[in-house]
Image (tube, rainbow, N blue to C red):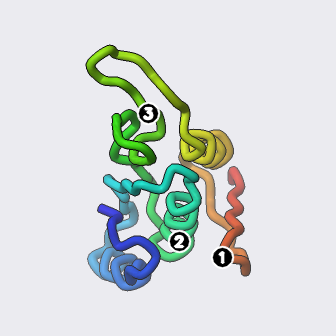
Amino acid sequence: HGYQQETGRRDLLNEAVKEKGKTKLWNSEYGDGDVSGMSMATNINLDLKLLHNTAWIYWQMIDEAEGWGMLKANMELGQILNVNMKYYIMAHYSRHIKPGMMMIETDGADTIAAYDP
């Protein structure tokens, strides 16, 4: 789970996984109430750089609360009311970083790069 936000020691978890001889680590749950998606993007970048996870899963695709879901909905009526910016941010990562790609080290905290070997 990824609820440490920007302060968690992802590097220590990555080291512990390596020590056990494991090669794949998933972040199987993350969520935040930031409708802009910037908190999510920051945490994806930190996870990719320090945790070296091979999967990243957002917890709530659809929610009635403002900012929690990628889509805001009226669940009772079954209607999508708004597409939050974090939907488009997640789409950017999902479209451009594919399974099996190798991450490239970058200097900038806001920069992620990957290539298909």
> In terms of depth relative to the viewer, which is nearer, 73 or 95?
73
> In terms of depth relative to the viewer, which is nearer, 79 or 9?
79
Q: Secondary structure at mark 3?
A: strand
**17 horizontally vs 102: left or right:** left
Circle 1: residue type: Ala
- Is 24 placed above or below 35 here? below
Q: Report x, y in % for residue 15.
A: 38, 82
The number of discs equals: 3
What distance separates the C-alpha of mark 1 from that of mark 2? 8 Å
Tell me the residue at 52%/30% (across/down).
Answer: 82
How many residues crowd mark 2 within 10 Å: few (<14), some (14–19), many (20+)?
Answer: many
- Between disc 2 and disc 3, the foreground one is 3
What distance separates the C-alpha of mark 2 from that of mark 3? 26 Å
Q: What residue is pinned by disc 1?
A: 109
Q: What residue is pinned by disc 2?
A: 46
Q: What residue is pinned by disc 3?
A: 72
Tell me the residue at 41%/54% (across/down).
Answer: 33
Q: Residue furthest top?
A: 77
Tell me the residue at 68%/58% (across/down).
Answer: 114
Which badge, 3 or 1, comes first in the chain's sequence? Answer: 3
Q: Secondary structure at mark 2?
A: helix
> In terms of depth relative to the viewer, which is nearer, 44 or 72?
72
Assess whether mark 1 and mark 3 are in contact (beta carbons under 8 angstroms).
Answer: no
Tell me the residue at 52%/63% (across/down).
Answer: 39
Q: Report x, y in % for residue 57.
A: 40, 48
> In terms of depth relative to the viewer, which is nearer, 95 or 14?
95
Circle 2: residue type: Leu
**40 horizontally vs 61: left or right:** right
Which badge, 2 or 3, comes first in the chain's sequence? Answer: 2
What distance separates the C-alpha of mark 3 from that of mark 1? 29 Å
